[in-house]
Image: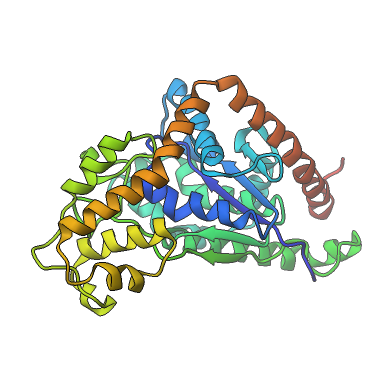
Amino acid sequence: MEFKPLVFSGVQPTGNLHLGNYLGAIQRFVALQDSHDCLYCVVDMHAITVWQDPADLKRQIREVTAAFIASGIDPTKHIVFNQSQVSGHAELAWVFNCVARLGWLNRMTQFKEKAGKDREAASVGLYAYPSLMAADILLYRATHVPVGEDQKQHLELTRDIAQKFNNDFGTSIAANGLGEAFFPLPEPLIGGPAARVMSLRDGAKKMSKSDPSDLSRINLTDEADLIASKIRKAKTDPEPLPSEAEGLKGRPEAENLVGIYAALGAVPKEDVLTQFGGGQFSTFKAALVDLAVAKLGPIGAEMQRLVAEPDHIDAILRDGAARARVLAEATMANVRDIVGFVR
């Protein structure tokens, strides 16, 4: 069965958006606008799987929305909204809780990492998070999802849930005139050259908002002078930059900085090494500072301007949610019929 191509992706509003979020997700969202119809969601219901201060949560929802708009996502051509304004996410997640199997959820590595040693104290929401993620995507019958390495397992589960729903309710789907399968099996759109941005202080660790050192990351709201200072202080090694990619093996900090330059400049890593190979890190870092400030400075400034206008951001989210609700309700009307609910 043919499904209309549609991209869905979401970003959690949990504060301190940084360069890793931008290069790993938001920059790609901007590029996908030219080739696909897109829904970009601030997944605030996922955020509360661990406790959030309500005032902080509101601020962070608006901040992520501001980052989308400041980076170049067009909320008039595509749909930008926050998840909690569309009740279909929660309703479909419950249906999928009844389709997914405990064994599937028990295999989810991200729950084990986030729950830590005291799993008994984790929320049921954190455990059932993948069912909600599947609902986020399939509520719009999205066909493609841009994902990083850490989300591939969740997308595979989404495909398993879609397949099981289609199989379990195959007779009912056909009886309702909805063809052989109701949900698509969404495909991953795997990231480009710097989908995985590492800490500026430790090339073996992912750049993270939870790292206690602010020097480990470049926040999207950092001023130009702070961006420059963090890059100059970024950990390197004593060797000059290699001229070929093979020479980056075993040099995680060098590889990270080259990857960041390549992604910000939209050039292959090989081109960066051709230009800077054999030279000292100080020369390369100076060029990286110029590039990062030129690319990120305007985004940070526009984010700060937008965040200062919460009514404007809220209007964008309301409009997006109203348009998302039309698509979601069409899906849920069919799901209720397929499952056998009376309406």
- Name the residue at 86% across, 62% down: 178
Q: Position of residue 208 (x, y in %)?
A: 31, 46
- Judging depth in this view, the residue of 197 and 343 nearest the camera is 197
Outermost residue on the left side: it is 238
- Name the residue at 27% across, 54% down: 287
Q: Position of residue 298 (x, y in %)?
A: 44, 38
Left or right: 293 in relation to 318: left
The quadrant of the picture occupied by the C terminus is top right
The quadrant of the picture occupied by the N terminus is bottom right
Q: Position of residue 202 (x, y in %)?
A: 19, 54
Above or below: residue 78 compared with residue 149: above
Name the image colouring: rainbow
Left or right: 249 in relation to 105: left
> Residue 114: in sight, yes or no?
no
- Name the residue at 60% across, 46% down: 40
- Judging depth in this view, the residue of 236 and 336 nearest the camera is 236
Above or below: residue 185 compared with residue 305: below
- Judging depth in this view, the residue of 36 and 83 nearest the camera is 36
Residue 51: quadrant of the picture: top left
Above or below: residue 8 compared with residue 303: below
- Judging depth in this view, the residue of 99 and 79 nearest the camera is 79
> Residue 172: in sight, yes or no?
yes
- Name the residue at 44% across, 55% down: 24
